[in-house]
Amino acid sequence: MKRRRLALWLGLPLASLCAFVWLAPALLLRFALPLLAASSGGAVEVTGAFPALPFGVRATHLRVARDGRELELDDLRAVLLPSGPRLDARVADGTLLVRGEGVLARRGFVRVQDVDLESLATVLAAPLGLRGRADGIWHFGPDASLEGSVSRGALVVQRPAQFEVAFAQLVISAERDPEGGDWKVRWLDVQGPPLSGSASGTLAANGQIAFQAQVRQLEEPVRSFFALLKLPTEPLPLELSLGGTLAAPQVQRVGTPPTRSNVTRGATPPPATR
């Protein structure tokens, strides 16, 4: 009898603790996360949050809003597995999958399928300058890499004037240097019209770019935009060198001395490549 009472006395608190731990992710998502978002100037709305096996949370709908941008996830499921954390969700007509290795998820991957890039702007630290439907996979960690494509989109140029370059498809393959943190873009190809071309080069950790590009197709209105920038428009294909930063790129025709006619206004020519 004494042993039974002792087991009951110890078992009830232990069972209550286990139940609280199992419910904790759902409670955090439902109550704590909206408070944290509100304190930082954002908003989070959660619908249908429940615990998920083996340890995690699921929700029928999650809405994240910040700075006038919104991200809406449906059928969200985030769990901690023996191999690491996993998150699955639907983003409109597309899907999002995040997998991490180990409890701390120091490496892993993010996979998107048919996801509108504009819907991800809420969770990105900086604007991409790119619109369209994305399919691809990003491996994060020390040996980070990116393989993907964007269809039915546009490149958004902010300087010297805002301009959008529409494309049918953009394909990219890149990897990051584990020591310096620079991204080496092995292949970047854009299929138009009105612009078709390819490029390869380096995107530094500080935002500086050094690319060599070839333009195979150049039609209006992009041709007039090139002329506005005092860039050559013929003969095709055009061999160009891109420097500066993503926010303020500097474009120069390869093999031509730097003058006002072949360098964008206010730019300095990038260093010659070997």
Image (cartoon, rainbow, N blue to C red):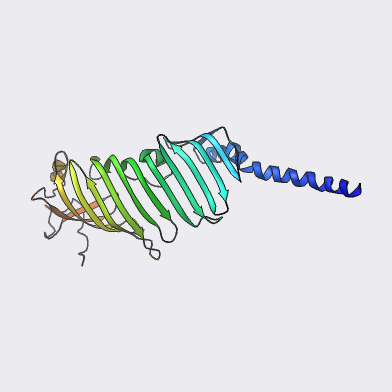
Name the image quarter holding residue 123. Answer: top left
Q: Is residue 79 left or right of residue 196?
A: right
Location of residue 115 in the rendering, given as x and y in whole percent from the top left corner: 38, 40
Name the image quarter holding residue 201. Answer: bottom left
Q: Residue at x 38, y 47 (%)?
A: 126
Location of residue 221 in the rendering, given as x and y in whole percent from the top left corner: 16, 38
Is any part of residue 203 visible from this angle?
A: no
Q: Residue furthest left?
A: 235
Name the image quarter holding residue 243. Answer: bottom left
Asked if residue 257 is positioned above or below residue 10 in the image, the reply reads: below
Q: Is residue 119 left or right of residue 150?
A: right
Q: Is residue 104 left or right of residue 256?
A: right
| Nearer to the camera, 164 or 206 | 164
Q: Residue at x 44, y 52 (%)?
A: 109
Location of residue 121 in the rendering, given as x and y in whole percent from the top left corner: 39, 41
Asked if residue 258 is positioned above or below residue 19 in the image, the reply reads: below
Q: Residue furthest bottom?
A: 274
Is any part of residue 188 visible from this angle?
A: yes
| Nearer to the camera, 59 or 176 | 59
Q: Residue at x 47, y 48 (%)?
A: 98
